[in-house]
Image (cartoon, rainbow, N blue to C red):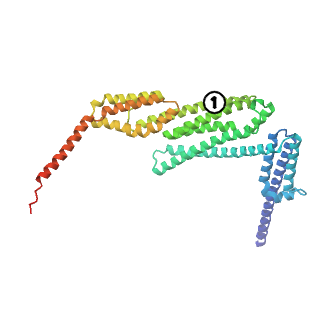
């Protein structure tokens, strides 16, 4: 019985070792096959290459092949015998150099475009990484905001997430347009001057790097960020600037892409969709601005009527001040001055004149003349609620007189020292 058991154990061990060995051989075989397949694809691409851009892309792919399979050099040296890994790389580089010479392509141009192509790949990878990270951050922010009660730790965590997301979105926007620039810089001619075959290759380049999809995704994320966060005047100032910058860059890029995708109706339609998405983003930024400014008054219990544009903002603030001036005589001096003090100290001086007015003026939402009109009305309100200066002077004089009288009486009551 023991003999049978021992035999079974030995057999099991042998089978396990065979399985491990087979798996290892299978893995080695797959590595060798993958290298051979990619190598043949590069050789085929070299044969059919016709432009400097194609040669540059092949050069980048050769470098990528070397980087991917360098850890398996010892294995490939055996499977490629009598050649080896390094010799194969030298051969394919030589084939590319010969093809470039035959096509009359200058090596410097290939090197320059290869560097741009590598930059495109790196930027594309970073854009994808940031997109994934942004999705996670948005979910965390939405989850925290859905909580009914937030302690200070949760509030701090939320603020940190918002800051990180805003930074990520801004970085990704920059990378998308840097990637587009790197692609176009590989072509010396204007888009309109490219042949149809060249346009198709440029379009393929954009497709590989998901340019249009990334532009759309970035706009969507910017809108979601607006809808998921409570923003201050300074935050909104930065976001308005980002939206305008993005729209300006797209204005320069859109016509170029339209020229590239002229034969692709679906993509051409998407370009028009992006214009609409940008307009929606701009509208939502404006709505967030007016919402935040309305909330500033609500927060301090100031009954300024709601507004959603610059003209209504100016008119409603002036109307509020007028109503307070008219009601001044119907309230006690303390009450009417308290409302004015809250408005001036907590809203007008603390936020509107320092943060909001520069933002509104810079974006042509409120004019300098309108701001002067508002300021004049606030000054008139102050005159209506502050104690009259004459009364103030009388009070001060009375206090001084009282103090002097008390000092005089005290001096009269003080006994004189006897003469010695």
Crowdedness near tag 1: few (<14), some (14–19) or many (≥20) residues, C-alpha within 10 Å: some
Q: In which quadrant will I find the N terminus?
A: bottom right
- The answer to whether 311 appears left or right of 11 in the picture is left
Q: Position of residue 144 (x, y in %)?
A: 51, 46
> For residue 201, what is the image quadrant?
top right
Query: In the picture shown, does residue 191 fall above or below 107?
Result: above
Q: Position of residue 377 (x, y in %)?
A: 38, 30
Query: In the picture shown, does residue 267 fall above or below 406?
Result: above
Query: In the picture shown, does residue 134 fall above or below 18?
Result: above
Q: Is residue 230 visible?
A: no
Circle 1 residue:
275
Q: Residue at x 47, y 36 (%)?
A: 356
157 or 237, nearer to the observer: 237
Q: Position of residue 58 (x, y in %)?
A: 81, 45
Q: In which quadrant will I find the C terminus?
A: bottom left
Q: Is residue 407 visible?
A: yes
């Amino acid at each position: 019985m023991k003999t049978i058991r021992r035999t079974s154990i030995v057999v099991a061990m042998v089978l396990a070792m065979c399985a491990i060995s087979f798996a290892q051989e299978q893995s080695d075989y797959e590595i060798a096959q993958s290298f051979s397949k990619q190598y043949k694809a590069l050789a085929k691409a070299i044969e059919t290459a016709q432009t400097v851009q194609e040669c540059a892309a092949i050069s980048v792919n050769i470098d990528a092949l070397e980087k991917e399979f360098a850890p398996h050099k010892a294995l490939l040296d055996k499977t490629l015998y009598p050649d080896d890994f390094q010799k194969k790389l030298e051969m394919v580089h030589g084939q590319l150099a010969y093809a470039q010479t035959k096509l009359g392509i200058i090596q410097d141009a290939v090197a320059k475009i290869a560097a741009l192509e590598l930059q495109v790949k790196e930027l594309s990878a970073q854009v994808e990484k940031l997109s994934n990270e942004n999705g996670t951050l948005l979910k965390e922010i939405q989850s925290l905001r859905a909580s009914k009660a937030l302690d200070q730790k949760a509030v701090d965590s939320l603020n940190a997430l918002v800051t990180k997301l805003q930074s990520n979105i801004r970085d990704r926007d920059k990378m998308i347009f840097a990637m587009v620039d790197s692609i176009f810089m590989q072509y010396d001619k204007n888009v309109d001057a490219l042949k149809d075959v060249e346009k198709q290759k440029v379009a393929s380049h954009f497709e590989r790097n998901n340019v249009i999809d990334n532009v759309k995704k970035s706009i969507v994320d910017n809108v979601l960020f607006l809808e998921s966060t409570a923003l201050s005047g300074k935050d909104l100032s930065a976001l308005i600037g980002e939206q305008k910058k993005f729209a300006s860059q797209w204005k320069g890029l859109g016509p170029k892409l339209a020229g590239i995708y002229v034969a692709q109706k679906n993509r051409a339609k998407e370009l028009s969709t992006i214009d609409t998405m940008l307009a929606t983003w701009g509208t939502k930024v404006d709505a967030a601005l007016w919402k935040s400014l309305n909330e500033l008054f609500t927060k301090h219990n100031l009954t300024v009527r709601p507004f959603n544009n610059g003209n209504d903002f100016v008119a409603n603030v002036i109307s509020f001040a007028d109503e307070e001036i008219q009601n001044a005589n119907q309230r006690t001096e303390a009450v009417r001055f308290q409302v004015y003090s809250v408005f001036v100290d907590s809203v007008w001086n603390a936020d509107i004149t320092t943060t909001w007015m520069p933002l509104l003026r810079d974006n042509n939402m409120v004019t300098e003349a309108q701001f002067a009109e508002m300021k004049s009305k606030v000054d008139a309100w102050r005159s209506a609620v502050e104690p009259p200066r004459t009364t103030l002077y009388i009070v001060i004089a009375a206090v001084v007189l009282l103090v002097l009288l008390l000092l005089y009486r005290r001096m009269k009551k003080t006994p004189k020292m006897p003469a010695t």
